[in-house]
Amino acid sequence: MIRIIEQRGSYDLAYRVLGVCGQVFRYGISSGRCTRDPSGDLRGALTPHKKKNQAAVKPEELPELPRSIATYERIGDRQTQLALQLLALIFVRTNELIGALWEEIDMNNALWIVPANRMKMRNEHVVSLTNQALNILAELKTIAGDSRYLLPGRNPSKPLSNNTLLFALYRLGYKGKMAGHGFWAVASTALKESGLFSPDAIERQLAHGERNEVRSAHNWAKYLPERKRIMIWWSNHIGALEKGAEVITLFGKSN
């Protein structure tokens, strides 16, 4: 069974299915249904899975991306266009945005608190919302209506499909060039190369947080003012590119 999956080139899936098989057999041992876990015999026998980085445009290709997204409404729906624009501004992982609930958004304090159970690092993540992001959220709310999701699907009780934003990028001509998580990679490069912000603040805004809960809580407060400046700078940068500017005037060094 595992070889069939492996032979079609799904190496990562083959390893994951093998892991599930191991769980089944270990349960079988504990419940007296079998005597051993044969899945262990196959470890190291399968073709290694090489992790691929998410596609992301090169820095010199970035200016055209927000301009392309600004035209998406001509070929697609408004909600998807707004979702792409929001993703470009806040550079979270696609699944974090897709699963976002209105109850996580604090419009009054301009913050989005992503709960730990939806974060890859299993730490609560804070996103400072700029005026540009708040304006997008306000329009998304009118589209979402009574749905608890920022981005409801055709069934309002469920979120948008994970592939919606990826396929929207395909339609804009970015197949193989840009994925949803690519916004994270592009922002990471630009922020680090700007020289305006401390590496620790950037890492925390990129959600490369501490696993230790005490340190994480401490750094949440310690870096939040600078993280707000990071988000303002990035939003202004994306906005300027969308309007046709190659660069924007930086507002100075951060503390």
Image (cartoon, grey):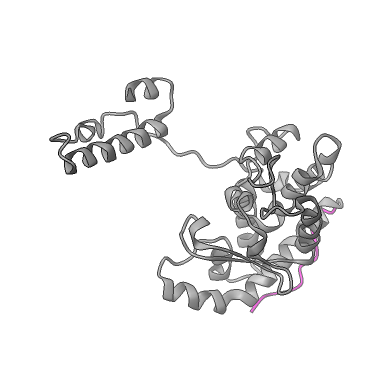
Q: Quadrant of residue 206?
A: bottom right
Q: Is residue 180 above or below residue 133?
A: above
Task: Examine the residues drawn in magenta and state their main secondary structure.
Answer: loop
Name which residue lies at 87% across and 52% down: 243
Q: In which quarter of the image is residue 175?
A: top right
Q: In this view, does 231 lie above or below 21?
A: below
Residues shaded magenta = 245-255
Q: In which quarter of the image is residue 106?
A: bottom right
Q: Which of 253 and 231 is in front in this view?
A: 231
**Left or right relative to 67: residue 180:** left
Name which residue lies at 70% across and 33% down: 170
Q: Where is residue 155 in the image (x, y as percent from the top left)?
A: 68, 41
Please tell me how many numbered marks the rendered image carries: 0
Quarter of the picture holding the C terminus:
bottom right
Quarter of the picture holding the N terminus:
top left
Q: Position of residue 54 (x, y in %)?
A: 56, 42
Q: Which of 36 and 178 is in front in this view?
A: 36
Q: Position of residue 11 (x, y in %)?
A: 40, 30
Q: Position of residue 244 (x, y in %)?
A: 86, 50
Based on the picture, tell me whether residue 122 belongs to the magenta stretch: no
Based on the picture, tell me whether residue 248 belongs to the magenta stretch: yes
Q: In this view, does 116 lie above or below 227?
A: above
**Left or right relative to 207: residue 195:** right
Name the residue at the left extreme: 35
Name which residue lies at 76% across and 72% down: 251
